[in-house]
Amino acid sequence: MSNGSRRRGCTHWLGTAAVSENFLPYGRQTIDDDDVASVVEVLRSDYLTTGPVGAEMETAFRAATGSHHAVSCSSGTAALHLAALALGLGEGDWAIVPSLTFVATANAMRFVGADVIFCDVDPDTGLMTPETLEVALVAARSAGVWVKAVFPVQLNGQCCDMAAIRQISQDKGIAVVEDACHTLGGRDMEGARVGACSHSDMACFSLHPVKVITAGEGGVVTTNDMELAGKLEALRNHGIQREPGTFSNAELAFDEYGAANPWYYEMPEIGFNYRLSDIHAALALSQIAKLEAFTARRRTLVARYDAALAGLTPIVRPFARMPGQNPAWHLYVVLIDFEAAGVSRAQVMNQLREAGIGTQVHYLPVHRQPYYAERGEPVDLPGADAYYARALSLPLFTTMSDDDVDRVVGALTDIIEGRG
Ligand SMILES: Cc1ncc(COP(=O)(O)O)c(C=O)c1O
């Protein structure tokens, strides 16, 4: 089947499973004709990569987040990996990561050879807290390991208490990198834009299609530190430096008059090809212009879910809200007491699927993944386990209608009240 017939036909493709046209996935992109035009323009231009659109997209991202530097790359995972490299994390170093996250946050530590200390989260928000961070630091101290970085995850669209997390970390010389892959377009408790790095060294974003805006695949690291930005730029391009002031081999780099040879570059350290193509950047650039509209629509949908689900408390509750934030909701998670409901999570998911509604679980705590469970000492993270035991992500995407929300809540209500 061609892509064209797939798009026009009556199916969506979720992995290998085809489902009906009015199926509501838990998340999906919103692409308009102007997004398509933006990409086509690049396809017809001279530069498919490392061209002017990539730079324009970074400028727009800086403006959207209020950061001094925005370094684009090929995915949110690449953004986390680059951040870990830029900090100089490596073998013998330890980093604290909340267990309630996508595996990529922890994996980025392992890519550079660092070890992970998993931190617990609040059972109702799923967020790392100053208290859970302190507990992880005490555990690190008693194990005699030196923590070099902490990677708080801004889950679902909400921010951790970053001022407190920064304070705790700064006192101990620990770098702070936000995994903000869920949170582009949000504001924290102090009204600062996510990505402005008011209380962190760097923030990492994903532009995957289920996120608030997309590049198809893509990522960005924001920072206010010029030195880190320079490292990130070099590391996403093999570690190559083109700035004559950094060249170490003068004989090869310069001619007899001291001018830099025009072909010359140096690779003082090893990096990767994590560049974002201009094709992807064009889509992201077009989408950034809609960020406010998309986040506003998501807030409206979340408010409608909250009101419609009120009748199902205490068995079904939306995850808890942090005070004073203006989040950019990525996921709408309900916490369900499956035991009290007399129905398992798999049954709820299967019955919703039969009703044409996709759901997902974000996330199995990463310390329970076999790779990590087999690597380290067993850890007890009751907050992460309690959140995971109840979590179910309901559909949330910009083009959902109010009726779609009502349909999801109606179907869930039928299941919980035994009419499913
Ligand atoms: C919290 C979190 N971190 C990192 C990532 C990785 O982003 P990407 O899929 O763009 O590599 C994701 C993506 O789902 C995520 O949700």
Image (cartoon, rainbow, N blue to C red):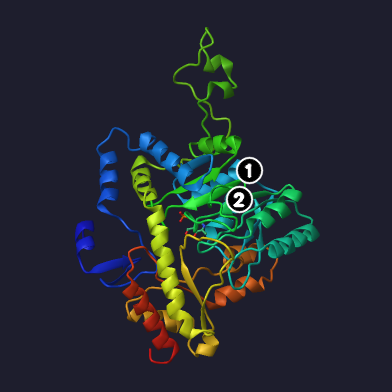
- Where is residue 176 shown, x and y percent of the image? 64, 50
Cα distance, mark 1 to mark 2?
A: 9 Å
Disc 1: CA contacts within 10 A as few (<14), some (14-19) or many (>=20): some
In the picture, the quarter occupied by the N terminus is: bottom left
Q: Are marks 1 and 2 in contact (CB under 8 Å)?
A: yes
Return the residue at label 1: 87
Could you tell me which residue is drawn at 33 percent across and 81 percent down?
354
- Where is residue 350 shown, x and y percent of the image? 39, 81
Q: Is 283 situated left or right of 80 in this image? A: left
Q: Secondary structure at mark 2?
A: strand
Residue 105, image quadrant: bottom right
Question: On residue 177, which mark appears?
Answer: 2
Residue 282, image quadrant: top left
Between label 1 and label 2, give the one nearer the viewer. 2
- Where is residue 217 shown, x and y percent of the image? 40, 51
Asked whether the viewer can see residue 143, the reply is yes
Between 222 and 325, the residue placed more toward the observer is 325
